[in-house]
Amino acid sequence: MFARLLWQLLHANRGRLVVALLALTSGAAVISALVNLDLDVGHKMTQEFRTLGANLVVEPPRAAIGASAVAPALMDESVLGVMATQRSPELVAAAPFLYVVARTSTGQPVVLAGTWLDEMQRLEPWWKVQGERAASREDAAHCMIGGNAARLLKAAPGSEIELRYGGRSAKLTVTGIVTAGGTEDNQIFVNLPVAQQLAGLAEKIGVVQVSVNGSAAQIDAFARRLAAALPALEVRPIRQVTEAEGQLLGRIQLLILSMVLLILVLTGLCVLATMTALAMERRTDVGLMKAIGGSITRVVGLFLAEVGVLGAAGGVIGYFAGIWLSRWMGERVFGTAISARLSVLPLTVALMVGVALLGAMPLRLLGRVRPAVILRGE
């Protein structure tokens, strides 16, 4: 009997109920889209920030570096073995660097950066390379050169460059021209053993640059674990990258939360207005129900069930509409597709049912209806 009465109520005032359903569906669609966006945008933005390169640096203590301007402190290459034991899913890439100011055969000073050239593909994916990247870290015959240095030395892919330092020399063939938009454009990149041999610093490195995937908190946690494994060295995040990422994500999440709260309030007000008008229209029905023995608890429960059904229907329909809306927002605002998450469905439905029930507060006024007054037509 309860189900039959509920079905009749849903059909009796279809006009006003459709208005409430549209309000709930619209609110659910926007909330579903925003929640999907919030859950996915953090991962998407983290991936985008990783294309900016390293966000963590391992280096000798700063006091040791400043102690001697002629012979800066260096680390032993065995540090890399310790770091290899700390690998985790968050670690994207790690590359050692040894910087040397060498000279070309014509006496032109150049900054030589010894590193793992094969790892640079993952550490600095945003580099634009004219020609080819060096494919192996064991390659001692090839190098990559920054755009500014290439113009200064009139070098191109395939050119040969002779580098000299402290009575030692190395002849290298250029494989690619690097355009990075920073100091890298003024450097020549070689594999680490070449720089070590040229500088006479066997098994020595100056710094390790690390790219870690995750939020600012995850990056800090990885840095603490690495610092515990390397107590004699300084492990520090590159604050310009990690703080910018954290601040931007925080602002986006605050904006999304504010919009969700605003949509819930507006949807609740719309349902409230609709239910107020509906309560006035149903005074006669309530009076008749109470006259034939219906308790006010069952009467109000019947109307609340009606509103709950509307909230659930609006939540389900709005969730699927929100999937399309979130994808559209992702492509238009962030230039990337947003993945739909099924976990958003129960949250959206629960929020819409809650808003619908709060908006149905005017139905409590039906408990004050007196059957005698209604039956007299007053």
Image (cartoon, helix red, strand yellow):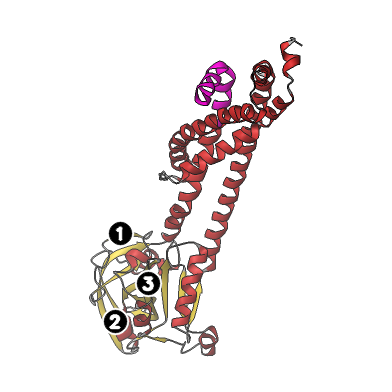
In the figure, 320 relative to 375: above or below?
below
Specify whether 117 is left or right of 70: left
Residue at 52% x, 65% y is: 217
Q: Earlier in the sequence, mark 2 or mark 1?
A: 1
Specify whether 86 is left or right of 32: left
Between residue 276 and residue 303, name the one nearer to us.
Answer: 303
> Which structural element holds mark 3?
strand
**Residue assigned mark 3:** 94
For disc 2, the neighbor class at 10 Å (few under 14, some 14 to 19, many from 20) is many
**Residue assigned mark 1:** 130
Residue at 38% x, 78% y is: 83
> Rounded to the nearest whole Å, what is the CA distance between mark 2 and mark 1?
24 Å
Where, quadrant-wise, is the C terminus in this rendering? Answer: top right
> Rounded to the nearest whole Å, what is the CA distance between mark 1 and mark 3?
23 Å
Residue 109 seen from this side? no
Region rendered in magenta: 1-24
Name the front one of labels 2 and 3. 3
Where's residue 263, x and y in %? 60, 37
Q: Which quadrant holds residue 250? A: bottom right
Where's residue 23, x and y in %? 57, 28
Residues at marks 2 and 3 touching, judged by CB atoms closer than 8 Å: no
Q: Is residue 289 magenta?
A: no
Between residue 184 and residue 342, name the one nearer to us.
Answer: 342
Residue found at the far front of this picture: 293
> Which structural element holds mark 2?
helix
Specify whether 22 is left or right of 182: right
Q: Which mark is residue 193?
A: 2
Residue type beneath disc 3: Ala
